[in-house]
Image: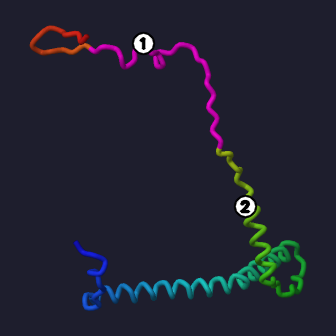
Amino acid sequence: MKTLLDIMFDPGKIDQIAVLITVVGYMVVFIALAVLVIVIGRIATVRDFFIRLKVRKKAVASNTPEPEQPKVSLSADENAAICTALYLYFSELHDEEKYVMTVKKVSRAYSPWSSKIYGVMDIPNIRNPHTQIIRNR
């Protein structure tokens, strides 16, 4: 039986495939994080594009010249407040369940499923293939 002192790390047992898997794993995580940073940084630009597109569609539908729109920008505090409000709104859409179980005893009419006369104490008939029917008593 090995003890905790017998277990040691041996760097000589690390092969090339383990190193390759480790390097590829770190690269995938790093690239994914870099992509997320870029996407999150460009969300405001995409939002502004869709706002301008909506204003243009309204202007074309009403045959009015497109008004000069100032650049729409929100501070980080305003974005945080909007996200918090949306989170609270969507979390209130689900009903809170009460985790209380109430057991009520209800008297019911006779049912053969709940009858005690067919219970465990009924003596079964045992059939012996070489003799007649034997009744256990």
Cα separation between marks 2 and 1 = 55 Å
Residue 120 locus on image (x, y percent)? 36, 19
Q: Quadrant of residue 27?
A: bottom left
- Circle on res. 41: none
Between 21 and 114, the one nearer to me in the picture: 114
Amino acid identity at mark 2: Phe
Looking at the rendered structure, the secondary structure element under dot 2 is helix
In magenta segment, residue 119? yes
Residue 48 locus on image (x, y percent): 76, 82
- Give residue 56's position: percent from left, percent from top: 81, 79
Dominant SS in magenta: loop
Q: Which residue is mark 2?
A: 90
| Mark 1 residue type | Ile
Q: Quadrant of residue 21?
A: bottom left
Question: Is 1 situated above or below 108?
Answer: below
Instruction: Give the percent coordinates (x, y) of residue 91.
Output: 71, 60
Q: Secondary structure at mark 1?
A: loop
In the picture, the disc for residue 117 is: 1
Q: Quadrant of the C terminus?
A: top left
The quadrant of the rendering that contains the N terminus is: bottom left
User: For the point 25% across and 13% down, which residue is it?
Assistant: 125
At label 1, counting other C-alpha atoms closer than 10 Å, the crowd grade (few under 14, some 14-19, many 20 or more) is few
User: Which of pointers 2 and 1 lies earlier in the amino acid sequence?
Assistant: 2
Which residues, given as a range, are shown in magenta? 100-124
* Residue situated in front as seen by the camera: 132 or 71: 132
